[in-house]
Amino acid sequence: MADKEIGKVVTTAQFNKNQCNNNIAKAFEKVMFYNHK
C-alpha cells in the first residue's frame, strides 16, 4: 500500500515538473520568436 502511494506522489511530481518545463519552453519560444522580428 505504501509503495503505491509513494509511486502516485512521485508520478504526480514528475507530471507537474513536465507541465512546468513545457510552460517554460513555450515562453522561451515566444521570446525567441519576438526577438527575431
Image: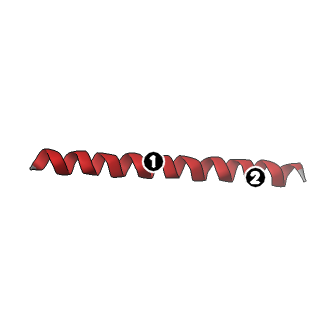
Q: Position of residue 3 (x, y in %)?
A: 84, 51
Mark 1 vs mark 2, CA separation in Å: 21 Å
* Residue drawn at point x = 26 percent, y = 50 percent: 30
Label 2, secondary structure: give it: helix
Between 4 and 20, which is closer to the camera in this rendering? 20
**Location of mark 2 (residue):** 7
Q: Position of residue 26 (x, y in %)?
A: 34, 52
Label 1, secondary structure: give it: helix
Binning the other alpha carbons within 10 Å of mark 1 as few (below 14), some (14 to 19) or many (20 upward) gives: few
Residue 22 falls left or right of residue 14:
left
On residue 21, the disc is: 1
Q: Position of residue 31 (x, y in %)?
A: 24, 45
Q: How is the image coloured?
A: secondary structure
At label 2, the amino acid type is: Gly
At label 1, the amino acid type is: Asn
Between 3 and 21, which is closer to the camera in this rendering? 21
